[in-house]
Image: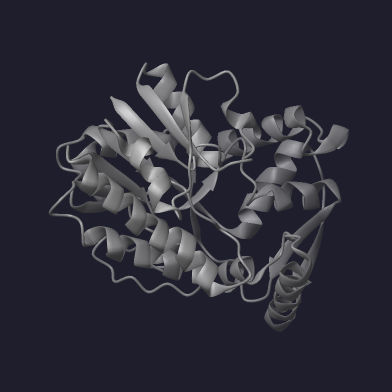
Amino acid sequence: MRALVTGANGFVGSALVRRLCERKDSVRCLARRGADLSLLEGLDVELVEGDVTSPPSLKRAVDGIDVAFHLAGIRRAAAREEFFRVNAEGTRHLCEAMVAAGNRPRLVLVSSLAAVGPTREFPDESAPLRPVDWYGESKAEAERLAAEYAERIPIAIARPSRILGPGDKENLVFFKLALRGLRVSVSGGPRPMSTIDVDDVVDGLVLLAGHPEAPGEAFFFSRDTTSVEGLQDEVLRVLGRRAWTVRIPQSALRGLASAADVFSQRTGRRLPLNRKLAQQLLAPGWTCSTAKARERLGFAPLVGIPESVERSARWYRESGWLGSRAGRS
């Protein structure tokens, strides 16, 4: 398989690239000028300089490929327009380039559970898209834009739940809090949260690249259900720590998140707390059903939360993200 991976230097993208290299696939990685490529070190890949927000740079990237795994995007931004410029319009630009390539390569679009929105009801893929934050809105728009090209290129959509595993930055804050003996609980909780390990997400993406029933469909990818409190308890267990629970009123969390976003917008520094994270924590739940992926694709995720958290802690420690106090892992 001749594969293009956008967002290849990120958390999920680099894990996918490693898997494709293990499979001896031909891998081309789209990378912006000056991007941190440390997660791709030592891998036999072709690097192409470009950006999904710059259509001219995509022509070489899509030339001769069989499949494009589209993971490039942003998870944090101070303005709604920035999410849409990168996550939604970037998808349009890639689709245009793939259509122009003329050989009908398959697009595996990595969307998110956030495109569907929060719920405690474990929805299937027939649920309407009802995002509640800018990130989710931009992912839902990316799906809509991709659908406009479905008759010209085969498109399969992945909607992972909350992803855990080595290299993850989204959940790193819980590990850092645990080292300080803190556990956070937002009033009104706990709220159910579907999770999946990054390696299982990669398995799902590879399935979407080759399975005959994948084009024209969207699939949730998930394995276990926990809560933010439950995830923190697992982190504390792995790190061998005890913690004092800090109970945060919902109004206080909203206020702190708004202030953090203003600070980020004015200084360019991204803080662990932001409106997006606050909206996720305050939602009634983030769940989904994986019945379709299991039945149609044979998707069988293997890595449970305990193993995923242990792998994460080990990687954080070895990479210096937790310092020398990380305890056992």
Image location (x, y in percent) of residue 274: 67, 68
Q: Count the numbered circles shown.
A: 0
Position of residue 77 measured from the top left corner of the image (x, y, whole percent):
61, 65
In the image, is residue 305 above or below residue 113? above
Instruction: Give residue 235's position: percent from left, percent from top.
Output: 69, 44
Image coordinates for residue 17, horizontal then vertical, percent = 46, 29
103 vs 118: above or below:
above
Q: In this rendering, would 212 be left or right of 174?
A: left
Asked whether, in this view, residue 117 is left or right of residue 192, the answer is left
Residue 219 seen in the current view: no
Q: Residue at x 17, y 37 (%)?
A: 103
Q: Residue furthest front?
A: 56
Direction from residue 87 to residue 210 in the image, left or right:
left
Quadrant where the image shows the C terminus: top right
- Would you place residue 114 above or below residue 208 in this image? below
Position of 63 with respect to 191 (left or right) is left
Q: Quadrant of residue 29?
A: top left
The N terminus sits in image quarter: top left
Q: Residue at x 38, y 37 (%)?
A: 61
Question: Can the viewer see residue 1?
Answer: yes
Along the line of sight, the residue nearer the viewer: 49 or 192: 49
- Above or below residue 81? Residue 237 is above
Residue at 30% x, 34% y: name it: 63
Q: Which quarter of the figure has residue 142?
A: bottom left
Colour scheme of the picture: one colour
Q: Nearer the viewer, residue 177 or 105?
A: 105
Is 90 in front, or is 75?
90
Q: Residue at x 34, y 42 (%)?
A: 59
